[in-house]
Image: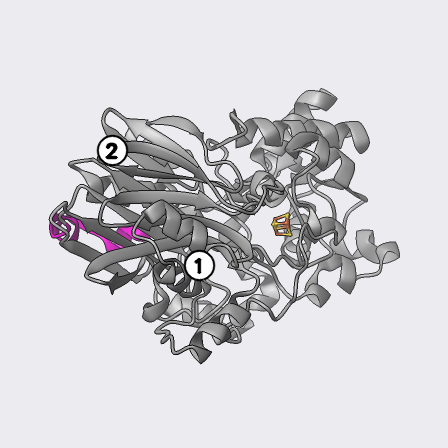
C-alpha cells in the first residue's frame, strides 16, 4: 500500500528478530512491509551469539539501501531494524537508526517509533553530567537512559531507564543476550509479537509478520514489554501504570489495511468508519468513490451502508515519485494530475460522493474535486471519515503548522465554495470513538491531549529538513 498524503507523515516503523537463521533477510522483509511508516532512511543491525555485530543503514527506501550483496554481509541470528521519517532532529545520516553503543564491552542498539515529549530536558540534564551525544535524535536520549541504568539485566535496564522518559515510544532493543520490545504506558504507537517455528519477532505492524509467514501472537500492551533470549520469552511491565491512548490516526490513515488492531484488520475498522459516516452524514447520490488508496475501505463502508454503488472514479499512479515539471506547470495542477486521474465514464453527469480519510490543508482535496468537475461530475459531496483536524500531534506524527490546517485557514461558511463541493461533512469524534475505542487519542481532532505537552519539550534541534532536502536523496 502506498499513502496518498504528503501532509501527514508517520515517524517510523520497527522490527526485531530472534533465533532465526535468516534474521537479516527477515528484518529486511519486515522493513519492506512497513515502508509506509517511513521512507527517509532504514537500517538493520544483526548479532551473533559470539557478540560480533554487523550493521548497515542509509538514506532512501528499503529496496534502494539493501541488496543481496549487502544482506549477505550481515551475519547473525538476531537483531533489529528501522524505517525512518524524522521530525525531531535533522535528517542526516548520523540520525539513522538503529542507534548502537558499546558499553562495558557490551553492544546495545535501539530502534524507536514515537516522539519523546521531554527529550530536550532529559538531554540537557545528562549533558550537564557529562554525557556526550552524537545525534540530534530523541532516541539517543532513551538509549543513554537505558545504558546508564545500574543493572546487568536487560529488563531491569529498560524498566529503570524509561522511568523519566515521557511521550510516545514503541521500541525494539538488541542486547548481547537477545532482543526486547517495549511500549509506552499510553500505547500511542502499535507494537506486536510474532512467531515462526523457533523464531520470535517484534514489529510495529502485523503486516511485517505476514510477509515472513509468521503468526501474530499478541499485541505488546501499553506499559508492557517482552524480552526474548535463549531462556525464552519473558514478559515485563513498566513502573508507570498504563493509561491507554492509542493513536486513532493509525486506524484512520497510517497503518496498512491488512495490519491488525485489537485483533481485527485495519480494513475492518475503516469499513466501520465509513458505515458510521453514512449513518451520521447521509446524502443521496449516484455513486460513491474513494480517494485511493487510504480511503478505499471507508468508501466501501459508506457504499455498503447507503446501498449506493461504489465505483472507481479516481485512479492513483503508484509511480509518482519526483518528476521534473516546467516552472509554470504548477498553475495547471500538474503535481496532483501526476498522482491522480479521474475515470470520466464513472462520473460524467452523475452525483458523486467522494469519501476521503482525512483533510489536512485541503489543497489536494480541492484539486481532486476540480478534476472530478472537469470530467463532468454533476454534484460532488465530500465525506470525511474522521473529524476536522484542529491541533498538532506531539506523539510521533508529523503535521503542518496549526495555522495551515484547513479549518484554521478557511472560514466555515465558505468551506464548500473553497473546496468546490456541493456539501461537506466530517465524522464526529463520538463516532470515531465508537470504532477505535473510547480511550484512543483524538487530540489532533479535539485538543484533549492524554498527557501534558510542551510544544518545545521534544525539540532537540529546530527542524531543519525541507521536502527538497529529503527528495534530494531519493
Ligand atoms: S494527536 Fe492525533 S495523530 Fe497524534 S497520537 Fe493523538 S490521534 Fe494520533
Residue 52 position, x and y percent, is: 13, 54
Q: Is residue 65 magenta?
A: yes
Is 386 in front, or is 447? 447
Q: Residue 350, can we see it?
A: no
Depth order, front residue of 152/313: 152
Q: Identify the main secondary structure in magenta.
A: helix
Q: Position of residue 197 (x, y in %)?
A: 24, 24
Residue 419 or residue 208, whichever sits in front: 208
Q: Position of residue 181 (x, y in %)?
A: 39, 43
> Which residue reaches farthest right?
413
Mark 1 vs mark 2: which is more N-terminal? 1
Report which quarter residue 472 is drawn in: bottom left
Helix or strand or loop: what does disc 1 sit on? loop
Quadrant housing the N terminus: top left
Q: Residue at x 71, y 22 (%)?
A: 305
On the image, the x and y values in percent for residue 81 come to 31, 49
Q: From the image, which quarter does the C terminus lie in?
A: bottom left
Does 307 appear above or below 51? above
Q: From the image, tell me which residue sits under label 1.
A: 85
Q: Is residue 230 magenta?
A: no
**Label 1 Cα neighbours within 10 Å, binned few <14 / some 14-19 / many ≥20:** many
Foreground pick, 41 / 298: 41
Ligand 1 contact, mark 1 (Cβ < 8 Å): no
| Circle 2 residue | 231
Label 2, residues with CA under 10 Å away: few <14, some 14-19, many ≥20 = few
**Magenta residues, as a range?**
62-74
Rendering colour mode:
one colour
Residue 362 showing in the rendered view = yes
Amino acid at each position: 500500500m502506498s499513502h496518498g498524503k504528503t501532509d501527514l507523515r508517520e515517524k517510523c516503523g520497527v522490527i526485531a528478530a530472534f533465533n532465526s537463521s535468516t534474521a537479516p533477510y527477515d528484518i529486511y522483509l519486515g522493513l519492506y512491509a512497513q515502508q509506509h511508516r517511513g521512507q527517509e532512511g532504514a537500517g538493520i543491525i544483526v548479532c551473533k551469539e559470539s557478540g560480533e555485530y554487523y550493521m548497515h543503514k542509509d538514506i532512501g527506501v528499503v529496496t534502494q539501501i539493501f541488496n543481496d550483496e549487502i544482506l549477505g554481509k550481515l551475519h547473525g541470528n538476531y537483531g533489529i531494524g528501522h524505517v525512518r521519517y524524522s521530525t525531531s532532529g535533522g535528517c542526516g545520516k548520523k540520525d539513522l537508526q538503529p542507534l548502537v553503543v558499546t558499553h562495558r564491552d557490551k553492544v546495545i542498539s535501539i530502534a524507536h517509533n514515537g516522539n519523546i515529549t521531554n527529550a530536550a530536558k532529559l538531554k540537557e540534564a545528562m549533558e550537564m553530567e557529562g554525557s556526550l551525544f552524537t545525534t540530534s535524535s530523541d532516541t539517543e536520549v532513551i538509549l543513554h537512559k537505558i545504558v546508564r541504568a545500574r543493572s546487568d539485566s536487560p529488563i531491569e535496564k529498560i524498566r529503570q531507564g524509561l522511568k523519566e522518559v515521557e511521550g510516545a515510544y514503541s521500541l525494539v532493543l538488541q542486547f548481547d543476550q537477545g532482543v526486547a520490545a517495549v511500549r509506552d504506558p499510553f500505547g500511542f504507537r502499535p507494537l506486536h509479537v510474532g512467531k515462526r517455528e523457533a523464531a520470535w519477532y517484534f514489529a510495529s505492524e502485523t503486516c511485517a509478520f505476514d510477509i515472513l509467514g509468521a503468526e501474530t501472537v499478541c499485541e505488546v500492551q501499553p506499559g508492557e514489554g517482552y524480552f526474548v533470549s535463549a531462556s525464552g520469552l519473558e514478559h515485563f511491565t513498566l513502573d508507570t501504570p498504563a493509561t491507554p491512548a492509542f493513536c486513532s490516526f493509525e486506524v484512520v490513515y497510517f497503518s496498512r489495511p491488512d495490519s491488525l488492531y485489537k485483533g481485527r484488520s485495519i480494513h475492518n475498522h475503516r469499513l466501520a468508519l465509513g458505515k458510521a459516516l453514512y449513518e451520521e452524514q447521509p446524502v443521496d447520490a449516484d455513486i460513491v468513490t474513494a480517494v485511493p488508496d487510504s480511503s478505499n475501505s471507508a468508501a466501501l463502508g459508506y457504499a455498503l451502508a447507503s446501498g449506493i454503488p461504489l465505483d472507481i472514479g479516481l485512479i492513483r499512479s503508484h509511480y509518482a515519485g519526483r518528476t521534473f515539471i516546467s516552472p509554470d506547470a504548477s498553475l495547471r495542477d500538474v503535481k496532483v494530475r501526476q498522482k491522480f486521474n479521474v475515470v470520466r465514464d464513472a462520473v460524467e453527469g452523475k452525483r458523486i460522493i467522494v469519501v476521503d480519510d482525512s483533510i489536512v490543508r485541503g489543497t489536494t482535496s480541492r484539486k481532486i474535486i476540480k478534476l472530478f468537475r472537469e470530467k463532468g461530475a454533476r454534484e460532488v459531496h465530500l465525506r470525511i471519515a474522521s473529524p476536522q483536524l484542529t491541533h498538532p500531534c506531539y506523539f510521533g506524527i508529523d503535521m503542518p503548522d496549526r495555522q495551515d490546517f484547513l479549518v484554521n485557514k478557511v472560514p466555515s461558511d465558505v468551506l464548500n465554495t473553497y473546496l468546490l463541493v456541493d456539501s461537506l461533512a466530517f465524522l464526529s469524534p463520538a463516532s470515531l470513538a465508537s470504532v477505535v475505542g473510547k480511550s484512543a487519542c483524538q487530540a489532533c481532532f479535539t485538543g484533549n491531549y492524554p498527557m501534558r505537552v510542551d510544544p518545545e519539550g521534544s525539540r532537540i534541534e529546530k527542524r531543519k529538513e525541507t521536502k527538497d532536502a529529503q527528495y534530494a536523496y531519493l
